[in-house]
Amino acid sequence: MHRRQRWTIPLGIVAIGIGAVILWNRDSPETLYRQAREVFRSDAALCDELLARGIDRSGGDFPAAQVLRCRLMGRAGQWVEALGYFSTIEQPQRAPGDELIMLGGEARAAGAVVLARLAFAAASDGEGEFRQAALERLAALEQELGRLDTAREAAGRLLELDPGNAIAAFVTARIELADLNPAGAADWYERSIQTTTSPELRNSARRELIGVRLDLGDAAAARAEWNSLAASGSLSDADQLFLADLLRLEGEARAAVDLIESLPAAIRMSERALLIAGLARLDLDEPQAAVDALLRVLQYNPAHKEAHFKVGTAYRRLGNDEVAETHFARNQELTEYAVQILDLRGRLAKTPDQPELIAELARLYRLTGRNELADRLER
Amino acid sequence: MSSPSRCFPLIIVFAGILAGCGSEEISKPGESGDSSASVSTPDGSSANVEAPPIKNQPRETDWFEDVTLRSGVDFTYRNGREGKHYTILETVGGGVALVDYDNDGDLDLFITGGGTISESEGIRGLPPALYRNDGDWNFTEVTAESGLTVEMDYSHACVVGDFDRDGWPDLYVTCYGRDRLFRNRRDGTFEDVTAAAGLEFQSWSTAAAWLDYDADGWPDLFVAGYVEWTLDPNDVCLTGENQTRDTCPPQRYPAAADRLYRNRGDGSFEDVSRRLGVRADGKGLGTLAADFNSDGFVDLYVANDQVENHLYFNDGRGGFTEAARRSGTAFNEFGAPEGSMGVDAADVDGDGLPELFVTNFELEDNSLYLNRGRDQFDHATVRFGLGGKGRPLVGFGTALADFDGDGRPDLLIANGNVSYHLGIHPWAQFPALHRNRDGKRFEEVTGEAGTWFRAAHPARGVAVGDLDNDGGLDVVIVSQNEPAALLRNRRPASRWVRLELAGTNCDPRAVGATVTLTTEEMSFTQFVKSGAGYLSTFDPRLLFPLPESTASGATFRATIRWPDRTRETFESIPANQTHRIVQGHGTQIET
């Protein structure tokens, strides 16, 4: 008994220690995080409890768990709360890159673009292997949001990491286009086409490049891209409008009209199809048919300045100078707005923080029918 | 510049390409499938910056031979760049007049001098140069002997007319400051009669044209004003990422008024601009006088920089109606004003009506306005295969002229940027030559044009004429701070007819006349113009190259509509000769 007592105390201490270690490990932040990940999809409540405990045990600084908790909130539709919570993370770039990218992707899919941007940006600032993937997503998102400066910066960083990155080239092309530099955009689209191995990206870049070539009036280059797109075997009915536009630029106005007429109604009656048809009808000296098509364009977009000019031209040919003049006047009004927009954009590029100029630019965007741009600007 | 939105389908292409939208699959570096092959940074100007990777040697197939070095013409228009004041004045450039000043039957050259800009002396003009054509591509400078070494302001254009109706060509030189009118004394010398003519106004004049707008027989004078600018204070324009200094754009300055001066017939002129409704809101760089609507009266086109162009239709009662908007010649294809510079006109599609061609600033198409008759024009740049061609370039001098002798006017464009450093494209640029294909399309043949075309130049004024009287249209081009170039046509037609019109009841040089030469197979129409090519004067004689199939010994009929609306025909005109067609000596046609 005495001997047993003599060993009992140390053994008990050891056992308590082992138990404490076991208990401690079971409740360590890393363990709790791992357990939370395991139940992330199956048991949101338990997941949240485990993450909360883990974060608590780490003294409130556990970026991986905090990011996972953001995802959990997002999964519950609480994106505003997720954004708020994310902003409390001291150094989100310390979170795993893949976790941040997933958060960004989910947020973007849910329309929580601010959180998406923050998540992608954090991942792109990390030191892990996911920087490139994060930058690809960040550049694409910023471009789609119209944040051209940050999009350009992200694309630039991406190109530094990977000079042959096709997505960076594609994003840069779109940025150049938004910056009213179609020739520069064309170069980047070409680069994207040359460097990508993704057929989907290649065809997307090719489609947009055809549009740029057509806008530049370079029918020969547009035709070459069209031939390549056609050879890929992935042409849609909508793509046929490129061909119609191309035919018109090649002087085959009748063929352009015939092609458009052969397309399904949904395509044939689209704004773009009607505009091409209207221009081709003018080329064919069929002013009444041109008026019919171009007035429909104006139904879609009453601020379409080119359509106003062309419908004015068609009315003039019909001898209706009075109506022609109203369209010419509207064209001039819209052209003046466009000049003012360019001026404001230039001034804002130099000194961005001018609320009154931003408001004026948004107003002009609305006057020219570009409500989406106005909304974006006001956001 | 504007173009129709093609409304790219806003496919969220990234959604399918990037695995970030909720997917758990994220590719790691090297797994995305995109190669890491290095691709050089795209450079929008590359196509037009680097010299072609071939040695620039003459080729057998070249359209033109650069004969400058052996011609004796060694003259450089100076724009004052060395002063580093980066003024807008330096952007405009100079021109050349092809003028038979000594009436010996061949074309001599008058080239404006430009000027210098310095802190100490301000803006100073440099003298022009007059070169006498001694034949066989030999020219002798005769500036001093001709009395043209007078002190002159910073100069741009020279237009040739016979304002005193003495049969000898006179010169009008536009300047920043005071323009000059030089009367030909008929002895190989000129006298400055600016003051006596009442033309001593101070302005910034660029392009000019002689036209007898009131059909009284005395050539009147149109002078385009550019902008109101002074050296003191000279604006500083900083652009680009590095905020580098460069020339300022015209948008910063108000327009300088255009002027129309009526020739009183006594050696003096009166300003009728306001009375005749000449617009004061243009920023004119190019002008062209010809009969654009085929009504027998001379009209006027003004190419303006960054604002709408102007077209004045002559009402036949001594007045004008400005109708650029109504005619479809004010804007680009979609109603936007452009930075317009040079202008020329010719019957491109063979319907007997003059098309207008206007060169424009970078990122803009040059504008081909197809004449549909009834005072209407269509913007046909794209339809004629010229879409996109001019966008990397700043177009200045231009000529619609039949260089290959196939009966259709081809198209020459001299390019050069106005910005030294900061234009999207470089200061020196490649010129362009386009062959007319059956009056339906233009096809670029710059690569076959000759050595001068295979190098970049800061080019401005262009003049076209048959300098060696061999039946081929030669070219003289004035560049900024680079010797003027003489380009000999290597494709002269073997058969041709040249007509030199002499008005008796109208402008003695018959500006505004329309001439149709009829062969057994076809007819060709040309127009007597003033002011074409950008700050320059073309050969006043009309050269009609004839088809190879033309029978030897065949004769031709010329139908002239003079700018006083009278019409007459001249029959039995033989080929390979220059014919002086004097008004009133043909067979009258009832109008």
Image (cartoon, coloured by chain):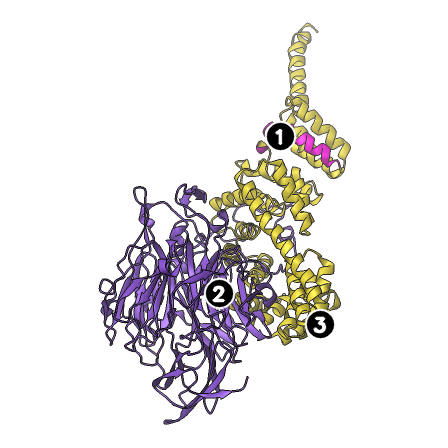
> Which one is in front, B184 or A64?
B184
Chain identifier of the residue bearing label 2 in the image: B
Say which residue appears at 31% left-offset and 81% top-offset.
B470
Q: In this rendering, does residue B39 appear at all? A: yes
The part of the image, by quadrant, that contains residue B499 is bottom left
Q: Quadrant of residue B330?
A: bottom right
Question: Which quadrant would the N terminus of chain B be assigned to in this image?
Answer: bottom right
Cα distance between the residues tagged 1 and 2: 64 Å
Q: CA distance from mark 3 to mark 2?
A: 29 Å
Residue under numbered circle 2: B358
Q: Quadrant of the C terminus of chain B?
A: bottom right
SS for tag 1? helix
Nearer the viewer's eye, disc 1 or disc 3? 3
State yes or no: residue A89 in magenta. Answer: yes
Chain appearing in yellow on the rendered image? A
* Three-letter code, disc 2: Val
> Which of labels 1 and 2 is toward the front?
2
Q: Is residue A131 above or below residue B346?
A: above
The residue range painted magenta reads A78-93
* In front of the other: A81 or B102: B102
Relative depth, front residue between B94 and B257: B257
**Image position of B413 with respect to B274: above or below:** below
The CA span between labels 1 and 3 is 66 Å
Residue occupied by mark 3:
A288
Measured from the top left, where is residue B124 in percent x and y? 31, 50
Looking at the rendered structure, whether the residues under marks 1 and 2 are on a common chain is answered as no
The residue labelled by disc 1 is A63
Mark 1 touches mark 2? (CB < 8 Å): no
Q: Residue furthest front?
A: B266
Q: Amino acid at mark 3?
A: Gln
Chain B in the picture: what colour?
A: purple
Q: Residue at x 37, y 93 (%)?
A: B552
